[in-house]
Amino acid sequence: MSLAKIIRSPLLPLGMVGVVCALTMVLGDALSGHDHRAIDLTARLLPPLSPDHLLGTDELGRDQLARLLTGLRWSVGAAFCATVIAFCIGSAFGILAAHKGGILGSALRLLTTFTQSFPSFVMAVTVIAILGDSGFVALTLTLGLVTWPVFSRVVYAEARSLFQREYVQAAEMTGMSKMRLYLHHVLPALIPTLSVLVVFHFAEMIVAEGALSFLGIGAPLGAATWGAMLSEGRGYMLEAPWLTLAPAFAMVIIIVSAHRLGQYLRNITR
Amino acid sequence: MAIRKLLSGFRDFAFVLLATVTVLFFLLRLTGDPAIVLAGEGATADQIQAIRVENGFDKPLVTQFVSTIFRLAQGDFGKSLLDGTPAMEKVLAALPATLMLAAMAITLNLIVSLPLGAWLGQSQTSRSRKPVRAFLSVLQGFPGFVIALLLINLFAASLEWLPSIGFSGPATWILPVVSVVCFLAPKLIRVVEANTWAALNANFVRTARSIGASDNVILWRHVLPNSLLGAVALIGAEIAFMLTGLVVIETIFAWPGIGWLLVQSTLNLDFPVVQAVVIVMVISVFLSNALTEAVQVILDPRIRVGARADK
């Protein structure tokens, strides 16, 4: 591919966001050159572009860029894990219900009715608040466990018609194991739909995680997450608006990139 | 058929309520000790035990569960563990604020989105529409609470035009309503746009044009009613969302609605109030879903005919 073609590709900005995420995930604090926890009361509320602090510092003199990148690790990591959990449980349940029908099918129908009336965010707030000391594991597990019906609903609808197709029925008649049938013959046909769904779900998980941390019931106290940074920055909106702007725009960049990727995938798989 | 539909609706409703109550009960009881919270800091073991006995927390879980179900069935939602007022009373006091926010947001959303969506849907190639589309697709990436924070940052903190939080008179209503609308409008505009475009290219519009209907007649008489049909489903979903999903926005603006009450009472481990809020939310979401379906059936004869054909 020629350089000009690469520059004009709609995927270039997405790739750049992806590279930044990957670098941050691997390198952590090394990328910004600061410890995100290091408090320096002589350098409080420095504006962005200060020497040594590219994005300024917060009310305790902690480097804003280092905190932002730590938050990226947390938010993207949590959203990714929650999406994987929801994807695995949801598609497994959806395929099983589509194949076996009967009790599983009715259970799925009731579950769908239930989740439509009991929104997952309210459920997550309640669960995490009750669990008390929340950490990364509790947060991702809760988000994954309350949102998986989204996947099973879509998978169920598509897989039901798949099990009527000749090639799936033929595969079943050869007497192969159920696992092989599901993984090698049903799941691949679902990938176009699922890939789009996964990307949009990831964006939603970023929002949910941010909102929970903002409310103070997601991340543990004092952790550098985007939600927590937004909530701390609220107190300094007049003196230091960058404290809220930086995490807000970081979150928006990730979400818009995920939406773009989802639209791109939808267009090429259609 | 109508009666059967109604009956199955009631069955679903009963199931959802029972499931909600069960999930809540076990979640709440299995993870924390409400007696310790109630007693406050520095309480002696005797005091905690007394509170436990007084509220029945010492009985086996199953006994507590059965008696909770019975009391709920009689409309007794318990008292707030904080100040002793009946839980349902607190929730019903907070409900009007949420309904008001939802009503204002829906109205403003319709005022903005319908004309904008209809305008965008008339052409897919026009140049003047391109920046609007780009703006909307970026706006769609903004989470509701981030919009709220940015608006506060700009209009309350920097420009000092509007109060940032509170619930006292029209000036305090503007920012919450605008944040909700900024969050909801892109989706509604999308739907109206897509439906307008589809209707403009439908056979019935070609027929109308061929018999000489003017552009205005086509737009108002043939296209808009059809694009509204698709919008109804989304508006229904948005109402359901606003009854439950405004938790963060209400908290940011200290708007005393049920979302704010939910956060406050979960943080205080005030179980009866949490339970009452969630039950009210579930009931209102169920009602708004049912209402949306009914409105769709009334507006669109095709759904009625389709349902009859299925039988």
Image (cartoon, rainbow, N blue to C red):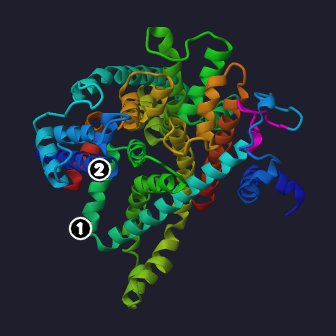
Q: Which residue in the structure is indicated by mark 1?
A: A103
Q: Which residues are magenta?
A: A53-66
Three-letter amino acid code at the position of disc 1: Ile
Marked residue chain, label 1:
A
Quadrant hosting residue B38: top left
Q: Which residue in the structure is indicated by mark 2?
A: A113
Judged from this view, the residue extending furthest toward the bottom is A174
Where residue B19 appears, as percent x and y from the top left, is 24, 50
Alpha carbon separation for disc pair 1 and 2: 15 Å
Q: Considering only vertical position in the picture, is A168 above or below B157?
A: below
> Which element carries disc 2, helix, strand or loop?
helix
Task: Give the residue displayed 49% in from the left and 33% down from the top.
Answer: B188
Seen from the viewer's position, the closer of residues A70 and B290 is A70
Mark closer to the chain start, 1 or 2? 1
Seen from the viewer's position, the closer of residues B262 and A18 is B262
Left of A159 or right of it: where is B307? left
Quadrant hosting residue A6: bottom right
Where residue B273 appears, as percent x and y from the top left, is 28, 33
